[in-house]
Image (spheres, rainbow, N blue to C red):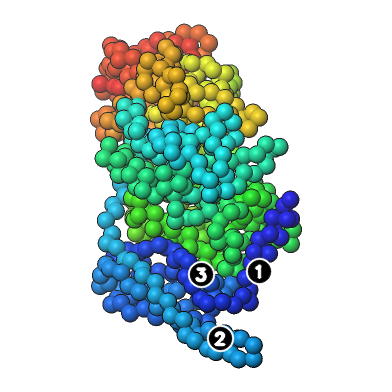
Amino acid sequence: MRKSLLALLCLCLASVFGYSQNPSIQRIDPSNWWVGMKNPHLQLLVYGKNLKGATVSINYAGVQLSKVNEVDNPNYLFLDLTLSPETKAGTFLIDISKTVVTTKGKKSRSSIVHLQQPYELKVRNQHPQEINSADLVYLILPDRFANGDPSNDKFADMADTAANRSNPFLRHGGDLKGIQQHLDYFTELGITTLWLNPVVENNQPQTNEGGAMRSAYHGYGFTDHYNVDRRLGGNSAYKELVEAAHAKGLKVVQDAVYNHVGINHWILKDLPMKSWLNQWDEYTNTSYRDEPIVDIVHANKSDFKIQQNGWFVPFLPDLNHHNEFVANYLIQHALWTVEYFGVDGWRIDTYQYNDLPFMNRCNQALLDEYPKMFITGENSVQSVVSQAYFTRNNLNVPFKSNLPSPNDFVLFHALNGALKEDFDWGKGLNRLYSTLANDLVYEDPSMNMTFLDNHDMDRFYSVIGEDFNKFKLGMGFLLTTRGIPQIYYGTENLTKNFKNPSDAEVRKDFVGGWATDKESKFVASGRTAQENEAFNFTKTLANYRKSSAVLQSGKLTQYLPQDGIYVYFRHKGTQSVMVIMSQAKEVKTLSTKRFAENLAGFTKGKEITTNKDIMSLDNITVAPMSIQVIELN
C-alpha cells in the first residue's frame, strides 16, 4: 500500500508534463494580500493549465513584478512581487499572454491567448492580542464539541461523505457555530483563550488504520490551506467565531501543520515539482525520535535524515522545507491567516519533525509582523534538554531555536507520573520539584504551555485512577505553577478514558453539544454532584488566577518536598500565594519555620478553593492527598 501511494503521486506529476492546450488560470495563492506589511516581498503561486512560457505583466503603482519563476510542471508559475511602502489598497490585474500554436493536418496557426486575473490588496486591520502566562487555554476538537449547524455535517461532493455519531472513527458533526454558541461557558469557567484543533480543510478519504476505516475528523491532513473545512462552517464561520470570541474577551489560537499535508491535497494531484515533497526510493517513515536531532555529539547523519525527512504516516506526505517555493507557501499562509481571520496565536503540530532552520524563519516572519505573537510548539519528548533544545533556551549549542513556547510534555509526564505513585526519594511529588529545578535551561519558562492531558493522551482522570483528590491536586498544580496552563475539553467535568483501542476513546463528544443529547455538561443540572464539584473547583481557581498577578507572573520559589508534602510560593512585590500539596496518607501538622524567607511579614491567609480563613501560619493542618492555595495577608 505504501509503495502504491508514492507511485500514485509520481504518476500525478508525470501525467501533466508535455501536455499542450490553451493556457488558463484556476487559482492563485495567497488568495489576496495586504499593503503595509513589513516584509515587502510576496510570492504568488499561480495554477492553471499550460502556463509555462507565458509573458506576465502587472501595471499597478507600487507593485513590481521582480521575477517569473517557471518550474517542472508547466501548469504553475511562481511570481515574485515587491510592494513598496506607498502601495495603496485596491485591485490590480495580472496580465498573462502566451502564443499558442494550433495544428490541423499539415497547417499550423499561431495565436495569442490573453488572460487577466484580478488580485486584491487590502488594508491591514488585525491586531493580535498577546497571549502569555496570564492566560488559561482551552483545547477543543471542533468535530466533537458541539453541533451548531446540522446542515453542514456532510457533503456529497467531498471525499468522505459519512457522518455518524455512533461510530467513534467517523465525523460527528461538531462545528464552529457550535463552539460560538457556548462562549459563555468558557468565560464562566475562567478561560481566556481557545485553541482549536485544525480547522483547515481536510477533504481526505477515509483511511484504514488498525483495521478500521477512519475519517480525518481531527484535522491534521490539510487539503486546501486557504479554505476552512465546509463541515465546520467554512471561512465565514471561522471569521464569525473569532470576532465573537474577541467580543467576549476570548483569544483564539490556530493549530498549524507545516510538516505534512493530506494525501488528497489539491497540490499533490498535480505537483509543481518532485521536490515539493521529501521523496525516498521506497516508503520511509520517520523514527519519531528526538535524540538524532538533539544529540549533536554522537548522532549520525542517517538517523537525522530519517527523523527529519521520513513521512509521519503513509497518508500524510512530508513537505520539503528546503524547497524555497514550499517554504514561501507555508510562511505566507501563516501571515495570511492572521490578517484574514484575526487569530491571536499559533500552536505548531509535530514541531521537531520540521526542518528547524525553516521553523526559525517561519516563526520570525510572524514575529516581524506581530512582535508579541504567541507561538507554541508540540514536541512529545521525555527530557528537559530535548524540550529546551526546540525552544528559546540557555543551552550552548550551534543551532538556536527562536520558538517562544514549548508544549511542556516533560512537566506533563512528571505530574501524571507523580500522582500514580507513592511519595518517595525521586518519586511522587518529588518529580514536580525536580522538573522545575531544571528550568534554568529555558530562556523564559513562564512561556511553557502546561497541561494535564490533550487530544493525543489518555484522559487525566483515568490516568489517576478516577481519584477525585488526585484530580484536585493535578488541577490545582496546573493553575498555580509557572507557565501557561491548558485544559482539554471535558477535563473540568471529569471526562475519562484511555486510548484503548484507539485515540477516538479520548475524543468523545462533549455531552450536551448535540440537540439530541438527553443531558448537558454545559450546565450544573446536567452534571453529577462530583462533576459539579470538579467544575466549581476549576472555576474558582481559574477565575482567581484570572485576577491574580501573583499566579500569572509572580516568581516561583519551591521547597524540597518532605514527609509527603511539597510547598511552593508564587510572589510578586508585596503579594504572595502559598501552595501546599500533600501526598501523605494521613493528616499532617506542617511546621512553617523553614519557609520563613517567604512568610516574613505575613501572619494569616485565606484558602482560595474553600474560602476559609487561616488565622495562624505557624502550624498548618494538612489533610491527606490534598492541595491548599493560600493567599497570604
Q: Kindly indicate whether the residue at mark 3 contacts the one at mark 1 (C-beta within 8 angstroms).
A: no
At 59% from the left edge and 61% from the top edge, which residue is drawn? 269
Q: SS for tag 2?
A: strand
Q: Nearer the viewer, mark 1 or mark 2?
A: 2
At 34% from the left edge and 56% from the top edge, which residue is drawn? 339
Q: Amino acid at mark 1?
A: Ser
Of all residues, the one furthest to the front in this rendering is 105
Q: Is residue 145 visible?
A: yes
Q: Which residue is mark 3?
A: 48
At 63% from the left edge and 32% from the top edge, which residue is drawn? 502
How far is mark 1 from mark 2, CA to CA?
21 Å
Drawn side of residue 576 relative to residue 267, left or right? left
Q: Amino acid at mark 3?
A: Gly
How far is mark 3 from mark 2, CA to CA?
18 Å
Residue 536, picture quadrant: top left
Q: Which residue is mark 2?
A: 101
Residue 478 position, x and y percent, is 43, 29
Q: Earlier in the sequence, mark 1 or mark 3?
A: 1
Q: Amino acid at mark 2?
A: Val
So how many labels did they put on this image?
3
Instruction: Determine crowd level at label 1: few under 14, some 14-19, many 20+ residues with C-alpha closer than 10 A.
Output: few
